[in-house]
Image (spheres, rainbow, N blue to C red):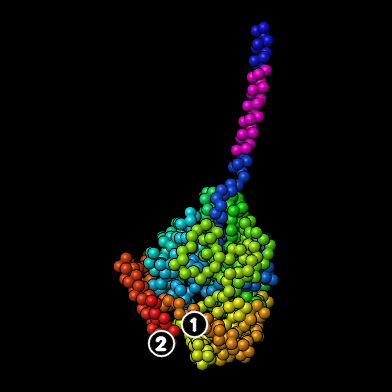
Amino acid sequence: MFILWILTGFCLYSVASATYARWANNFHASRANEVDKPTTSSSSQPHIIFIMVDDQGFRDVGYHGSEIKTPTLDWLAATGVKLENYYVQPLCSPSRSQLMTGRYQIHTGLQHSIIRPTQPNCLPVENITLPQKLKSAGYSTHMVGKWHLGFYKRSCMPTQRGFDTFFGSLLGSGDYYNHYKCDSPGMCGYDLHEGEEAAWEQDRGIYSTHMYTQKAVNILARHNPKRPIFLYLAFQAVHSPLQVPSRYLERYKSIPNLHRRKYAAMVSCLDEAMRNITLALKRYGYYNNMVMVYSSDNGGQPMAGGSNWPLRGSKGTYWEGGIRAVGFVHSPLLAKRGTRCKALMHITDWYPTLVTLAEGTLDENQSLDGYDVWESISEGLPSPRQDILHNIDPIYTKAKNGSWKAGYGIWNTAVQAALRVGDWKLLTGIPGYSDWIPPQTFSNQLLANRWHNERVRWDRGKTVWLFNITADPFERVDLSRRYPHIVKKMLLRLLQYDKTAVPCRYPPKDYRSNPQYNGGVWGPWYSDEDEEEDENYNVLSNYLGKRRRRQKAKRKGKFKRKT
């Protein structure tokens, strides 16, 4: 009996041990799978990844027929939605200011040129920015890359405008390796920042496209994907100077034009960076609940290797080559993927679109110029946008032949302005360099002789142009004389916009901005007392601006006093 009891106990022990072993193995296996399997967000709020690239021309992406190889961008766009009627501004600061505020330049006072590093100027602090809105909706907000929205006082810095963290440059351009920038002789300084301090310790002389990509990947790796994140990655590439690691040049030996060859290599490096970002989004569990927006900030610069062909004009102009941008949205959340969106869109639209997607709130008193275009992108519905004010610049060089007479007594055509309404586009003043320039791939001649011989002669002295952009996207047939009634209607629309403009902010150089007074670093130079004085000036300037507009309206007999 005793022997039987021992045998029974031994059998039960063996069965129990085997059962425990199987359970333990299954438990550890399941734990291992949990570790290996990327976590996914439990929030209904999507992660928002906004990629801003610098000076990428309309043609300079594979799916627009370029000789430059961009397999990652092509795949992201092909499996997302290509934005083929998408507009930005012709220069860096204007596009970035409108992205951050959802408002036209005329409504922020930044309607002229860019923000210079020596100017006491920045994105007005009274404007609520996109990251501030997303932060109030529960997002973690991070910026990597180029700011270019001013930094003369601390309240202008990215970490004071809604970003939890910032790593990048404050200026518009600089060396890709040592991060130095000279604005003029004797005005040189270091421009790489972590938060609000110079990032000396993090600087390893790494090419900025690689450095910014690695920083963005590190942010994704550290962040909990169960909490929504807004990552604004604003690459320095492919802005001049034309610098790139030599290994990217190898694939473009067949391009004899040195500028185009270097530029192509920089775009390929950027494409590789996009691949690494996409892999990180998948690896760390963001991808399935993510919206990625890709946008250039303006058209390409042919003198620095870029191409907008077959569009007319280039960066810095209001021709299509300066303002029609490469753009797409990539997301598993899109209702219709693999499509081309031809709905009219503008960079101001990202503000209300992304805030609404993020389940944030839009205040009525913000007076946004952007529209929520998510249904147009995702479902292919018509755009709520019917027009785009490309700009009205009261400071830009006046056209010598411009006059009120040429503007039918409605508008002084000496003033640089551009407006899109439906299919129609109107330009006045001096729109900028207006040639059609094919890619300079096979030309190794000197800059002065290398341009295509299709130059504009027939419109010299003109100060008004009208194009049907839908039928004539290359702006070859001016219709201003054939349809004067449409010109008049659009000039009246320009006038309506001009009445809402705030005074232009474009202060002179402040020599206190010199980095030699700030430890060799570009950074804020205003004191607290200066900031208080500056705020008082802004209040007075806004008051006087409103008063001038009311007096101007009175003189025209169109002012109606509120009762």
- The nearer-to-camera label among 1 and 2 is 2
The region drawn magenta spans: 11-31
Task: Give me the residue at 49% from left, 66% from top.
Answer: 100
Observer able to see residue 280: no
Dot placed on the residue nearer the N-terminal end, 1 or 2:
1
Please state the horizontal and vertical placement of residue 133, each as a whole percent of the image. 47, 60
Nearest the viewer among 14 and 138 is 138
Query: What element does badge 1 sit on?
Result: helix
Q: Amino acid at mark 1?
A: Leu
In the rendered image, is residue 145 in sight?
yes
The reply to whether discs 1 and 2 touch (Cβ–Cβ < 8 Å) is no
Residue name at image x 46 percent, y 60 percent: 132
Question: Would you say 228 lies left or right of 118 here?
Answer: right
The one nearer the camera, 262 or 93, is 93
Could you tell me which quadrant the N terminus lies in? top right
Main SS type for the magenta part? helix
Binning the other alpha carbons within 10 Å of mark 2 as few (below 14), some (14 to 19) or many (20 upward) gives: few
Name the residue carrying label 1. Answer: 495
Residue 555 - label: 2
Q: What number is the disc on residue 88?
A: none
Q: Position of residue 536 (x, y in %)?
A: 32, 71
549 and 522: which is toward the camera: 549
Residue 270 % position (x, y) = 60, 64
Residue extending furthest toward the top = 1
Three-letter code, disc 2: Arg
